[in-house]
Amino acid sequence: MNGTILNIASVLIGGIIGLLFGARIPERFKSTIIAGMGLFTFAMGVQMFLGTENPLIVLGALILGALFGEWWRIEDGLHDLGAFLEKRFGRDDSAEGSARFIRGFLTASLLFCVGPMTVLGSIQDGLTGNFELLAVKSVLDGFAALALASTLGMGVLFSALTVLVIQGGISMLAAQFGAAVFGSGLNEAAQEAIRNDPRVLEMTATGGVLLMGLAVSSLLEIKKIRVGNFLPALFIAPLIVWILSLIP
């Protein structure tokens, strides 16, 4: 959990700095910074997707994930959570201020929790206590929180709750699994095997597509996409790989 705590601290510190000094940054600078982050996020998503060994697995995961996500209304749930937090802690009662708060919360939550560093870093932290990967992620998330908070406001800070639940949950599950199966944890060879496991590769590739969707929808604002409803695809992708491995 040390890596998750560090990540939460970086998001809060970066977000607070963005809130304090964001008003001094001209709007045209803010919009350009967000656009730059959108381009970088899209490029990172492409790089992640190119690691797939079977694009059809990613496509299948996205389709099934979208069906489950729309059925469970995940995006609406995240939106309602953002609205609840805005009512409790927001300072701008206008409709525009509320929408800005929710957009900041949703964008930052997805950006910080969808990607290979989240999954691999949390597993590594839980199994071995090595949070080096999450430390790198924390630095990146801190700067991202600074830029987002300067434009999208206080909602970005509350994405730390999402980081706590998702990263912390994965680390705790990995710690329990490691204690039950591996005893003292994994050695470097075993960690490398996990990183190269087809299930992890396809999960990472699927996460890359979600990052591209996030960039197009929330950061570049090209087309509205309910990216949150695709989140089940992250778990469906490795499940498809496992099912295919059972077929002779």
Image (cartoon, helix red, strand yellow):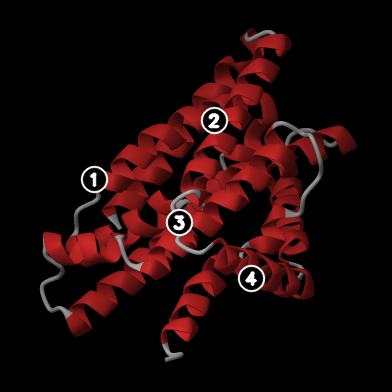
Q: Could you say where residue 131 lies in the image, as x and y percent from the top left?
A: 25, 50
Circle 4 crowding by C-alpha within 10 Å: few under 14, some 14–19, many from 20: some
Mark 1–mark 4 Cα distance, whole angstroms, equals 33 Å
The quarter of the picture where the C terminus appears is bottom left
Q: Could you say where residue 247 lies in the image, as x and y percent from the top left?
A: 46, 90
Q: Nearer the viewer, mark 1 or mark 4?
A: 4
Q: Amino acid at mark 2?
A: Phe
Element type at mark 2: helix
Label ID, residue 164: 3
Circle 2 crowding by C-alpha within 10 Å: few under 14, some 14–19, many from 20: some
Q: Can residue 37 be seen by looking at this rendering?
A: yes
Label ID, residue 132: 1
Q: Is residue 197 left or right of residue 130?
A: right
Looking at the picture, tell me which residue is in the foreground, 13 or 114.
114
Q: Is residue 9 left or right of residue 156?
A: left
- Tag 4 near tag 3, CB within 8 Å: no
Label ID, residue 60: 4
Q: Nearer the viewer, mark 2 or mark 3?
A: 2
Label ID, residue 40: 2
Q: Is residue 1 left or right of residue 108?
A: left
